[in-house]
Amino acid sequence: AQSVTQLGSHVSVSEGALVLLRCNYSSSVPPYLFWYVQYPNQGLQLLLKYTSAATLVKGINGFEAEFKKSETSFHLTKPSAHMSDAAEYFCAVSDHNTDKLIFGTGTRLQVFP
Amino acid sequence: DTEVTQTPKHLVMGMTNKKSLKCEQHMGHRAMYWYKQKAKKPPELMFVYSYEKLSINESVPSRFSPECPNSSLLNLHLHALQPEDSALYLCASSRLAGADTDTQYFGPGTRLTVL
């Protein structure tokens, strides 16, 4: 079965610093991968998705993620953090067998001034 | 427009009450989902409707009863809930069912508190 692992339940960066949120997946077939962001007391918003068209995926709000098959990774990056980026970030993979979206445990991003 | 709306935003209910959560989308999506999210946890899938028919029930207790009156609406009827059912309930929709085929778009959620 497919699964995702998010390394680091909390990540803290200074405003203007690089943001790196890690996601590793396990899948026996090429996966569809997603990053969602959840701001406090809100629903999930799609940041970006990988569907095998291109390994570097650009999303909203300046985020991007690179699919690396050799490392089974799909890390999320942003060159310069902004205070408004503080939120919970979820990596998710599609499960080919069950047609379900499998979420990682989430990473809380804190941005300090 | 990728908007999924949910009402109410907040709901407080007693264990003997009956209430309903409502979800609506006008994107022409034919798959709709209910998720439950506890604090500091990822969403957990509860139900999936595909073309207005229930296709997945994740062994959810019968005190939760979903309903899909038409392709735009999804309800979750609540009865005799327990305090541990307090959570954020998220609705989502996608063009078709099956995570491979399309992106799920989420609503803002209903924050449910059971007293």
Image (cartoon, helix red, strand yellow):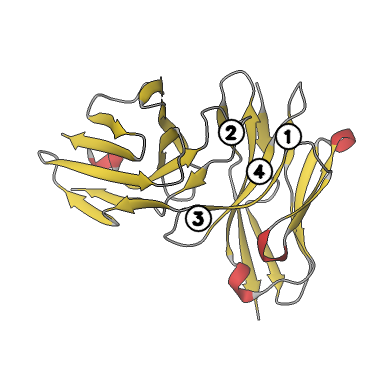
Q: Nearer the viewer, mark 1 or mark 3?
A: 3
Q: Amino acid at mark 2?
A: Ile
Instruction: Please check whether the numbered discs 4 and 1 fall on a single chain.
Output: yes
Cα distance between the residues tagged 2 and 4 = 10 Å
Please provide percent x and percent y for residue A48: 67, 50
Cα distance between the residues tagged 1 and 2 = 10 Å
Mark 4 falls on what kind of element?
strand
Q: Amino acid at mark 1?
A: Tyr
Quick one: label 4, few (<14), some, or many (20+) residues within 10 Å? many
Q: Which residue is mark 1?
A: A25
Q: Nearer the viewer, mark 3 or mark 4?
A: 3
Q: Quadrant of residue A6?
A: top right
Q: Nearer the viewer, mark 2 or mark 4?
A: 4
Q: Are marks 3 and 4 in contact (CB under 8 Å)?
A: no
Q: Quadrant of residue A20?
A: bottom right
Q: Which chain is disc 4 placed on?
A: A
Question: Foreground residue, B81 or A92?
Answer: A92
Instruction: Please check whether the numbered discs 2 and 3 fall on a single chain.
Output: no
Q: Which chain is disc 3 placed on?
A: B
Q: Which residue is mark 4?
A: A34
Q: Amino acid at mark 3?
A: Asp
